[in-house]
Every structure is written in structure tokens, then in C-alpha cells.
Image: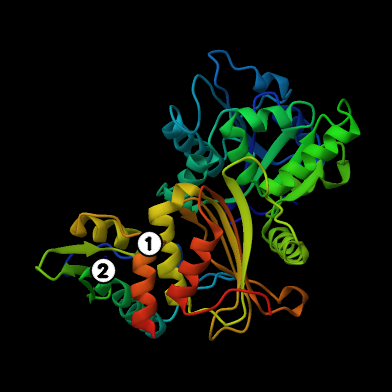
Amino acid sequence: MCALCGVLGGSDHWADAPARPGVFSRTGDPLERRRERARRVSAANRILRLYGMTLSDWQSSAFTLSTATGKTGLVDDLSHLWAVAEKLLGRACDPLDPVLLARLGSARD
Amino acid sequence: MTEAIPLFTPVTLLTGFLGSGKTTLLRRLLADPALADTAVLINEFGEIGLDHHLLERIDDRTVLLASGCLCCTVRGELADAVRDLHSRRERGSIPPFRRLVIESTGLADPFPVLTTFHADPVLKHHFRMVGVVTTVDAVNGAATLARHAESVKQVAVADRIVLTKTDIATSAASASLARRVRALNPAATFSRADDAAHLSDLLTPSTGMRDAASADWIAAELQSATPLSAHATSITAFALTFATPLDWTAFALWLSMLLHRHGTQVLRVKGILNVAGTDMPVAIHGVQHLVHPPTHMQAWPDGDRHSRLVFIVDGLAREAIEQSLATFCGVHAGVG
């Protein structure tokens, strides 16, 4: 737990699995963990900007997700990201949506 | 000398439809001296529990949860019962056990049991789900699969499938059912209850076998001209392969988004991934919304460095998932 703000640390998400023998993890080394968080923010924003939202790292312990109008939610990990995004957005975020895939494909090109 | 208690006690869920031979199989397993240090938790739907008597092993390591179903009415009691077993083992008031088997009711959805061990703040530090064993009755199994969605789900999420009552079924019926079950869950290992040589393997952690089974099935799928899963059901199984190494961050975002929106329809996802920047393959394994921590495999099966993903889905189109993954991760699916 953070001694200053009282935020509980540690994520239960499979992509943040604690480094143990045999487990593939990018959380074992502090530097690698921070790099992965930066990559995650960057990759998530490529998708989220198509919904008009932006993800930012918060204190290396959580993320903030904001809409263009300033509505903001706190995100603990990837398991919460899409639930918070849908709540702020008021509609579903569907990775199988053909319109989303077309826009994402165009943005990648 | 007594072996030390493992850091994480392996937990196996034994499921299968009503009357499919779960208790008979469990009784045979517990008769094996190699599996003597096994705690058992039995859940029955009826008011009066009988299965623990049928087991013929009543001791402090056998717990009965009666009058309800694990996946709904007594779900909280499951966590309490396992915590209590753990606590009594730590205090030394029961003989130490090295593994736990949970026999569910024949009507139970396996998924809530799996999530209990993942989500409970105490259990997740002491227990690990290592496999789902599903019994399928060779006499009534085909009719049960046709009529009861619960039984289809029990087969779809299994790591190991045991065909029971083959001694009283015709060989043609057994073979037909075996094909049907394999099509529903091609990535599970498959055995017959009368094959004593493999019985004790059912309770051992199954990661290695699962990886090998997945690799075998994917190879068969790729060589097959017709889909293995062409059956009159909305549940289908398919494999995707990718030659380009996957961006792990993009993949994790994609899978988390897919499971958030469609998790109840993704009955199983398992795969061997070539992750960019990592030499060894990474194995992933998930059931609906629950994904286990990814693991490093020791070597590439057959030296093939393609990423391979197996999906067992209910009502989702293969093409949609394939296109979505390709777009999110910037890779192209296909062989070669």
C-alpha cells in the first residue's frame, strides 16, 4: 500500500501476474514494469481515442480514463478498463465491432 | 518421511452430468495409494447427501456441501469449507493433504467454482486450480449433450474428459460419442474410465499435457479439410495461427476487451504464443472471464514457432475473432 495516499497496490489481472518460477511476467523488475505500463497506456490510447477517450498512468499504481468532455474514472487494471470505459461512454466497447475494426485498421495504415 | 505440503495445493474440479459416474470415478481414484493424501469436497443438490457415503471414505478430509448447488446457492459455502480445511490442516487437527478434489453436482456450471479460487483473498494464496475433469456417460451421454446445455458446458471447459460406462455401452455408441465430445473440446485429453493406467494422471497438474494436447489438435485441425466442430450446436471450436511474433501488450489489451464483452461466450481459450522479444513460448489458458497467469513453456512443440490459439466459443464467429485479433495486434492469421 502507498504510505502517502493509502492506495492498495497489486493487481489480480492475468497480464500483471506476479513474477514466479515458470510464470511469464513483466512485473518482476521495477523498470520493466514501468516500461510495460507505458506501453500499455500507448497501446490502449490507440483504441480508446476512437471512442474519444484518453488513458493516463496515475502514480504507477492505477490509471485515469477521461472523456473529451472531462468525465474521468479511475482504472485499477485491464479487467476494470473496459468496464470503466463503457460506463463513461454509455455504450458497449466491442472488439468485434466491424466499424471499430475498420477505423482501427485505417489508423494503423 | 512425509513430503512437505506444496506451496499451492492443487485443486481439481470433478464435474459431469447427473449419473455420469463422477462418484464412481472418484472412489476408484481414492483407492489408489498414490492419491491417499487427497482431501475431498462433495456438493450434492438434494436435501439428503449420499455421495459421501458412496465414496466409502468418511474422515475429516471429506466434506459434504448438501442442499444446494456450488455454482449458485452454496457458492460462499465452498470458499468457507475450503478455508476451514486449510485452517485445520495448518493447525494439524486433520491429516495433511497434498491435493483437493471438488465433486460438483451434475447440474453445476464449472465456471463459478474456478473463479472462487481465483478471487477469494485467502484461497488464491494457498490453492491453485489445476484442472477440470469431466465425466461423460457412454450410454446416455449423447442424449444428455443434446438436451442439457449444462452438460455441453461441462465438456467444453474440461481439461480432461473421461468416458464412463463403456463396459455397458456398444462400441459403436462409445466411438460416436467420443467423436462428438472431441469435436466439442478437441484440446482436452481424453480417456476411458476402464483405462486404469491413466486414472492417477487425472489429478496431477495438467499444464504439460494440455500444451501437448493443444499442439496435437491444432496440427490435426490444420491438416483437416473439414471443420471438426460441424455439429448442430452453437458451440464451435477453432484454431488460429500467426507467423508474426505477437505484441504482448496489444494482445493483452485485445483479449481483456474480448473477454469483458464476450467472456460468457468464450468457453475456453488456450494458446501457445510467440511473444515478440521472448525466446521461449508463452502458454495462456482461460475459461470465460477467467484467465490463468501466463506461463513459460520449456520448448517449442515440434520446433514450430507459430503462435497458436484455440477457441471454444458459443455463438461467436471465427472470422470475427480472427479479424479482430489481426487488426488489434497488426498480424495476419494463417498457416505458413
Q: Nearer the viewer, residue A101 or B31?
A: A101
**Secondary structure of the residue carrying numbered label 2:** strand
Residue B26 seen in the figure: yes
Q: Is residue A83 above or below residue B110?
A: below
Name the chain under label 2. Answer: A
Residue kind at label 2, given as amino acid type = Ala
> How far is the residue under mark 2 from the one under mark 1?
28 Å
Residue A27 seen in the figure: no
Give the residue displayed 43% in from the left and 48% down from the top.
B122
Residue kind at label 1, given as amino acid type = Asp
Residue marked by disc 2: A62
Q: Nearer the viewer, residue B134 or B94?
A: B134
Which residue, as the protein is rendered here, is positioned at the far top?
Answer: B48
Residue A36, quarter of the rendered image: bottom left
Give the residue displayed 65% in from the left and 31% down from the top.
B146
Q: Nearer the viewer, residue B323 or A70?
A: B323
Evaluate whether label 2 is on the same chain as label 1: yes
Residue B237 position, x and y percent, is: 63, 53
What quarter of the picture does the C terminus of chain B occupy? bottom right
Name the chain under label 1. Answer: A
Mark 2 closeness class: few <14, some 14–19, many ≥20 residues within 10 Å: some
B66 left or right, relative to B38? left
Q: Nearer the viewer, mark 2 or mark 1?
A: 1
Disc nearer the start of the sequence (2/1): 2
Q: Nearer the viewer, residue B323 or B303?
A: B323
Q: Is residue B331 above or below residue B147?
A: below
Residue B90 position, x and y percent, is: 53, 44
Q: Is residue A82 above or below residue B122?
A: below
B128 left or right, relative to B28? left
Residue marked by disc 1: A97
B246 left or right, relative to A6? right
